[in-house]
Image (spheres, rainbow, N blue to C red):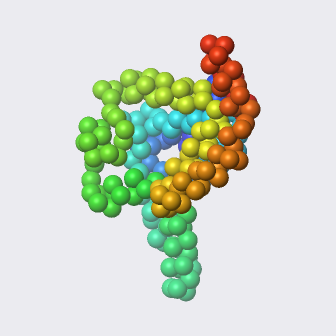
Amino acid sequence: METLKLTIENHIAHVIINRPEKTNALNQTAWDEITEVFEYLDENPEVRVVVLEGGESKHFCAGIDLSLLMSVSQTNIACDARRRERVRKDILQLQGLIGDGLVREMAYTGRSVDGKEAVKIGIVNRSFADKNTMMEEVMKIATTIASKSPLSIRGTKHILLHTRDHSVADGLNYMATWNAAMMLSNDLQEAFAAKMQKRDANFES
């Protein structure tokens, strides 16, 4: 890969944005590789947690590379309607890697936000004094998540997303259906056995 580095160890995938000369700004290659990598990780049963890091730059990521914005807005299509249709398609593709929190931040402020303010207004969970401390703490969290039942973590993600977009009644009904389908799993039996035997659980991928 040209713009990313990837390692997988102990069920944790570590993805590093690797464009330090461009302060890790995302060009078209980066967007394509991010899509490819995360689709691969999503289907890899050995991966339980993904840590995304900005590489050797003072910024995690400077955002969209200006060259990409220019390429989206400039096209050789002669028909104005078809050109705008193409631009809309490209923008929708870009929007699909952008989370709700980032969309709101850019839409509401359009400015830089430091770590302490990001915590205060809820964009991030916490901030740290330096990158090394942050990565140590992030890997602790990742290790904790990776030690849990993969089936339970996947179920929790699905339920939280469903609950966010539906009523309380719909959310509870979905949760009941999910639990009925998934609760009686090998993971649950292994969790109980590990607890009784005072050892770490060994879950299937």
Query: Is residue 100 something one can see in this rendering?
Result: yes
Q: Looking at the picture, how far across and down is residue 155, in whole percent? A: 61, 44
Q: Is residue 132 above or below residue 83?
A: above
Q: Looking at the picture, how far across and down is residue 152, in whole percent? A: 62, 38
Label count reads 0
Q: Quadrant of the C terminus?
A: top right
171, 109: nearer the viewer: 171
Q: Looking at the picture, how far across and down is residue 38, in whole percent? A: 61, 46
Name of the residue lying farthest toward the top: 198
Q: Quadrant of residue 24?
A: top left
Q: Which residue is located at x 48 percent, y 36 percent?
A: 53
44, 153: nearer the viewer: 153
Q: Is residue 83 above or below residue 120?
A: below
Q: Quadrant of residue 48?
A: top right
Q: Which residue is located at x 51 percent, y 85 percent?
A: 80
103, 69: nearer the viewer: 103
Q: Looking at the picture, how far across and down is residue 189, in whole percent? A: 71, 28
Q: Quadrant of the N terminus?
A: top right
70, 127: nearer the viewer: 127
Q: Is residue 160 above or below residue 45?
A: below
Q: Which residue is located at x 56 percent, y 46 percent?
A: 157
Tell whether 140 sits left or right of 193. left
Query: Is residue 95 something one can see in this rendering?
Result: no
Q: Which residue is located at x 42 percent, y 44 percent?
A: 61
Q: Quadrant of residue 2?
A: top right
